[in-house]
Image (spheres, rainbow, N blue to C red):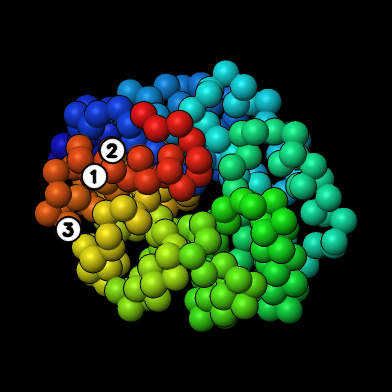
Amino acid sequence: MGKKKTRPLPQELGLPSGGADSHVHLDFPAFAGKLEQTLEKAQKTGISNLGQVFLGAEAYTRGKGLFDPFPGVFFILGIHPHDASRYSHQDLEPVASAVQEDSRIKALGEMGLDYYYLHSTPAEQEKAFAAQLELALDLDLPVVIHSRNAEQETLKILLDKGFKERKVLWHCFGQDVSLAWEILDQGWYISVPGSITFPKNTLLREAVAKIPADRLLLETDCPFIAPEPYRGKQNEPSLLAFTALESARVRGMDPSLLWVQCGDNCRGFFGLNQS
């Protein structure tokens, strides 16, 4: 029998404090009963801040208290395109109230269009997306964008709603250089997930090599999209270290410098205290 493959531990990679995971779903059942352990491992890996995404006001009400002991966690709140078929105008009232009452909510999202799964029709998704963009303008908040198989439609709605040069973060970017520049040319930011480590993802690596260092963020989108060498396992914030190492490699940067730069970009985008 062959030896069991040994994976490096993220907390032993030597990254400094100051990293940031811009997009996590730590309220999902996958983390039930192990949130403290997960966040402790993230801290040991060098992660100082995490953006907890709540998919709707009910999820926020249920889950916000879980993070009271963890001041480095901030919140993002919005209606996912998968849930747009259930959207009504009244759904935004508790979102607006939560923003006004909770200073930990730093952005609206993830919102946008998903024409890959089509759990909601394009018309339903566009309606919910446009309404959230209008609310973000009213509240003067950044937005976090989900876009899959609908990139040009997403760009058009954002521009039609007046978001050029406003704070927009394109979450879980997985496309090529040309789309990256379409996003960057609007003054927006790009967040890169663990899929940059996948061997066949050449176009994404080429794009990440070209993104200006001050516009790049890192994310896990955990519990999804675990990077190599943990691909196929449940993702968690500590594994962001491997996304950082690969991003630094393709850019020819020192991993520690990229780690802190992307962390500072996250803190600057969401209006957090700098490390």
Where is residue 62? Give x, y as percent. Answer: 74, 34
Label 1 Cα crowd, 10 Å radius (few <14 / some 14-19 / many 20+): many
Where is residue 162? Give x, y as percent. Answer: 60, 71
Mark 2 vs 3, N-terminal side: 3
Where is residue 116? Give x, y as percent. Answer: 56, 74
**Circle 3: element type:** helix
Question: For the point 52% across and 69% down, which residue is it?
Answer: 164
Q: Residue furthest top?
A: 69
Callout in the foreground (3, 1): 1
Given the image, on which type of amino acid does mark 2 rest? Val
Label 3 Cα crowd, 10 Å radius (few <14 / some 14-19 / many 20+): some
Alpha carbon distance from label 1 to label 2: 6 Å
Alpha carbon distance from label 2 to label 3: 17 Å
Label 2 Cα crowd, 10 Å radius (few <14 / some 14-19 / many 20+): many
Question: For the point 42% across and 59% down, which residue is it?
Answer: 189
Residue 230 visible to an observer of this rendering: no
Against 172, residue 5 (above or below) is above
User: Which residue corresponds to mark 3?
Assistant: 250
Label of residue 258 in the image: 1
The quadrant of the picture occupied by the C terminus is top left
**Circle 1: element type:** helix
Question: Image check: 199 left or right of 109?
Answer: left
Alpha carbon distance from label 3 to label 1: 11 Å
Task: Tell me which corner region of the image, top left, top right, bottom left or bottom right, holds residue 153.
Answer: bottom right
The quadrant of the picture occupied by the N terminus is top left
